[in-house]
Image (cartoon, rainbow, N blue to C red):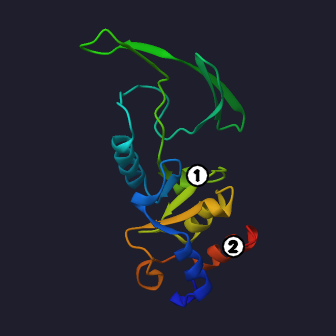
Amino acid sequence: MRNHEFDESVVSFINKRSVHKSQLSLSCLRLYTTRQRAAVATEKSHAEFPGEGQGFQGDSMGTIDLIEYMEEENICLKKRLPNENDAIYWIQRISRQVPGTRHTRTQFPIVPVFAITIHKAQSAIIDCVGIHLDNMLSHGQIYVAMSCVRKLEALRFLSTETPLNVKRKLGVDIDAVEIIRKEKRI
């Protein structure tokens, strides 16, 4: 942690990639320190997501499935099992009557996730990541969160204020930031 003596290049690195939460695109997965924060962020994003939502009972909360490919009537999902094997699931398109009309809505019963915990993201490869820096609990979390992004250009830091006042507000593990910068060859 270097006794809160922050290398100015690290502060600059974080500030160049900092955005306010509201400015992060919906395609970017947000990483939070706790389940509660991730759940609140996902619920808020679902409310802002275009279209009508409908609840479905299915796979457990927090399960990460990847869409392998899509057909007209089916989606093939791949899920990593605890034994490191992959399971393949097929999701069929469903049709339901729109109440009060003669129309039928046909859709896939999939709920997108917008936020997960840093712990859940560990060892995942994610295309776009927004790391919520407020209340970072441990030194290793920032390293884990930063190491899961596929390309450095797709890494963003989130906070309630931008540019981040790193020296005053955040207890970020600067060594972890340095390691990721070198690994991603900035």
Left or right position of 131 against 135: right
In percent of width and height, residue 92 lies at 55, 17
What residue sits 52% from the left and 76% below the top? 15
SS for dot 1: helix
Q: Amino acid at mark 2?
A: Arg
- Residue beneath disc 1: 121
Label 1 CA crowd tier, 10 Å (few <14, some 14–19, many 20+):
many
- The answer to whether residue 122 of the structure is visible from this angle is yes
| Closest to the observer, 85 or 127 | 127
Name the spot of residue 174 as percent of width and height, x first.
59, 79
Task: Determine whether 171 is above or below 64 in the image.
Answer: below
Of the 4 image quadrants, the one containing the C terminus is bottom right
Residue at image position (31%, 8%) is 102
Answer above or below: position of 149 versus 92.
Answer: below
**Spatial separation of the CA atoms under disc 1 and disc 2:** 19 Å
Q: Residue furthest top?
A: 102
Residue 47 drawn above or below residue 146: above
**Local crowd size for mark 2, using a 10 Å CA cut-off: few (<14), some (14–19), many (≥20):** some
Residue 100 is left or right of residue 89, and the answer is left
Residue 7 visible in the snapshot:
no
Relative to 41, residue 80 above or below: above
Q: Which residue is mark 2?
A: 181
Quadrant for the N terminus in the image: bottom right
Residue positioned 68% across, 55% down in the render = 150
Report the residue that reaches farthest toward the front. Answer: 102
Choose mark 1 or mark 2, whichever is in front: 2
Are discs 1 and 2 less than 8 Å apart at CB? no
